[in-house]
Image: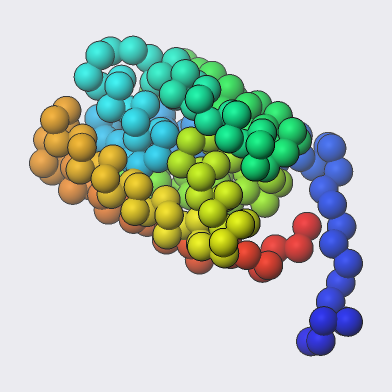
Amino acid sequence: MTTASLPDRVPHTTLEDVMALLLGTLVVSFGASLLKQAGALTGGMAGLAFLVHYATGVKFGVAFFLLNVPFYWLAFRRMGRAFVIKTFCAIALVSVFTELHPHFIDISRLNPLYAAIFANAVMGLGFIVLFRHKASLGGVNILALYLQDRYGIRAGKVMMGVDVCIVLASLAVVSLPLLAASVCGAVILNLIIAMNHRPNRYLA
């Protein structure tokens, strides 16, 4: 297909963006809720929020929201006002939804390895939905998307490098088996993003 025959970009409507934010954050928060119940974690700002939660007892949703606050200025300067607004809404929704899920679903037994792998896979799908509607979940996501848009470095690779460091730091608060399960989950999450979110692949 030649450049001249490529279809024109058709931007998402406001309704499509709203629906994507709700669906994406519901999916991501469900994965985070599973990780929290299993005592596992992941990478990115969610991983940092889990570390704070396990070490201090602060609610995951509160820690996740507050840890992302310093990154809004970078997002505003580099990604634009619309991106910041969508990202702020996405972070707020994940923070709230993660605390609400346990009130609607109760899982009596949850294998940590299963939880880490399945939850991260689900979260990866949620991230793709948010990314394709020009939103993120702050922190590492903002940095990864900026580097991808500015320098063509895949977002998944940036996130994977940071995530490995975060997961290793979790040795202070989680057991070795849980750490191994969390590493597997974080790798799966970032592979999903690396394979499905590349520069110039998605036109909308």
Image location (x, y in percent) of residue 170 = 21, 35
Q: Is residue 135 visible?
A: no
Q: Residue furthest left?
A: 176
Count how many numbered circles sit on residues in the image. 0
Q: How is this picture coloured?
A: rainbow
Q: Residue furthest front?
A: 77
Locate residue 6 relative to residue 81 in the image: left or right: right
Image location (x, y in percent) of residue 85 = 70, 29
What residue sits 87% from the left and 57% below the top?
10
What residue sits 61% from the left and 57% below the top?
150
Image location (x, y in percent) of residue 7 = 86, 72
Residue toward you, 191 or 98 = 191
Image location (x, y in percent) of residue 136 = 59, 40
What residue sits 83% from the left and 37% below the top?
15
Name the image quarter holding the C terminus. Answer: bottom right
Q: Residue furthest bottom?
A: 1
Residue toward you, 101 or 74 = 74
Q: Quadrant of residue 43?
A: top left
Locate residue 60 relative to residue 39 in the image: left or right: right
Is residue 80 placed above or below 103 in the rendered structure?
A: below
Locate residue 46 relative to residue 172 in the image: left or right: right
